[in-house]
Image (tube, rainbow, N blue to C red):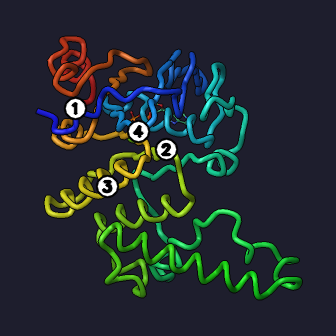
């Protein structure tokens, strides 16, 4: 049984909404008329067989691709025509199925790269107010170290990212996304290829970050992780939303069982 179900009652204006979202790639309708809300404070699961359209849905939500039709709202604002960096600025964070940190930069440097509106990036400001740039740089560094502590990687803060294992890269990815102060984080298969010990760390960190009020949308095949973390679960198959419920409910749904048996599983 889920040990997080007591938080299910939380309601409020949705953090993220997909309304009748469609994306066509030539003849393939990869996401077909999908609508859902992500409620503030929840961890919402998104599961379904390989090829269901889950990662494509993340691409649409994050702005890596634009929908053929339909709307996406972030905290009530229509964003479906906006570029990805604008949506990051509005509080949407996203991690990738295969994280690619810059291998020769340290963990701190990798995390600092994700800071929003850093003065150091503005060339003119560098000439006019170098003292302010230096102060912001120090603040960003302090924040990066705090976030590395949060994901249990502080002991490796000054190591190059290339020394990290696959699981540690997923934790670094979480610290990186936190640096931009997101209201919602989209996680694409955080448990894939992660060993059992590190998986427990990742589950704990997601819980901690969620307890700070950050909302999650989680794609994951590890059903144990989904059951333990998610307040609610959406199931996609063949580009469509099949059903919604608690992890236990959807696992018992005959339509879901059929989708997995008929699909890549
Ligand atoms: N850029 C693209 N061009 C063409 N087809 C794509 C593209 N991205 C994804 N697809 C197709 O869309 C479908 C859904 O893929 P994906 O979203 O990766 O599924 P999931 O993450 O659920 O495994 C697959 O058939 C995939 O081949
Ligand atoms: Mg995927």
Q: Quadrant of residue 147?
A: bottom left
Find residue 41 and name its label.
Answer: 4
Q: Indicate which label's residue lies in the foreground, 2 or 4.
A: 4
Badge 2 marks a residue whose secondary structure is strand
| Pointer 2 residue | 184
- Residue at 27% of width from left, 20% of height from top? 245
Q: Indicate which label's residue lies in the foreground, 1 or 2.
A: 1
- Residue at 59% of width from left, 78% of height from top? 139
As drawn, 14 above or below 177: above
Q: Quadrant of residue 26?
A: top right
Q: Quadrant of the C terminus?
A: top left
Q: Is 246 on the left-hand or right-hand side of 34? A: left
Badge 3 marks a residue whose secondary structure is helix
Q: CA distance from mark 2 to mark 4?
A: 9 Å
**N-terminal-most mark, 2 or 3:** 2
Residue 155, percent from left and from top: 31, 83
In the rendered structure, are the residues bearing label 1 and label 2 in contact, judged by CB atoms less than 8 Å apart? no
Name the foreground residue: 211 vs 157: 211
> Ligand 2 is located in which of the four quadrants?
top left
**N-terminal-most mark, 1 or 3:** 1
Q: Is 222 on the left-hand or right-hand side of 205? A: left
**N-terminal-most mark, 1 or 2:** 1
**N-terminal-most mark, 2 or 4:** 4
| Pointer 1 residue | 5
Q: CA distance from mark 1 to mark 2?
A: 19 Å
Find residue 208 and name its label.
Answer: 3
Residue 154, percent from left and from top: 35, 79
Find residue 122 and name its label.
Answer: none
**N-terminal-most mark, 4 or 1:** 1
Residue 257, percent from left and from top: 18, 18
């Amino acid at each position: 049984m889920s040990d997080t179900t007591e938080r299910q009652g939380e309601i409020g204006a949705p953090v993220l909404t997909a309304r009748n979202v469609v994306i066509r790639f030539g003849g393939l309708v990869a996401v077909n008329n999908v609508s859902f809300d992500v409620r503030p404070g929840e961890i919402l699961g998104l599961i379904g067989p390989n090829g269901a359209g889950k990662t494509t849905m993340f691409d649409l939500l994050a702005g890596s691709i634009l929908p053929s039709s339909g709307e996406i709202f972030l905290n009530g604002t229509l964003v479906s025509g906006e570029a990805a960096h604008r949506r990051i600025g509005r509080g949407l964070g996203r991690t990738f199925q295969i994280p690619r940190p810059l291998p020769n930069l340290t963990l701190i440097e990798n995390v600092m790269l994700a800071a929003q509106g850093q003065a150091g990036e503005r060339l003119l400001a560098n000439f006019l107010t170098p003292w302010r740039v230096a102060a912001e740089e120090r603040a960003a560094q302090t924040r990066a170290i705090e976030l590395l502590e949060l994901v249990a990687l502080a002991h490796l803060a000054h190591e190059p990212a290339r020394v990290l294992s696959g699981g540690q890269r997923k934790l670094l990815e979480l610290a990186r996304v936190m640096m931009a102060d997101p209201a919602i984080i989209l996680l694409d298969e955080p448990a894939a290829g992660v060993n059992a010990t590190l998986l427990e760390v990742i589950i704990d960190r997601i819980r901690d970050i969620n307890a700070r009020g950050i909302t999650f949308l989680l794609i994951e095949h590890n059903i144990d992780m989904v059951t333990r973390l998610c307040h609610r679960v959406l199931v996609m198959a063949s580009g469509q939303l099949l059903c919604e419920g608690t992890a236990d409910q959807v696992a018992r749904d005959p339509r879901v069982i059929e989708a997995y048996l008929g699909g890549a599983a």
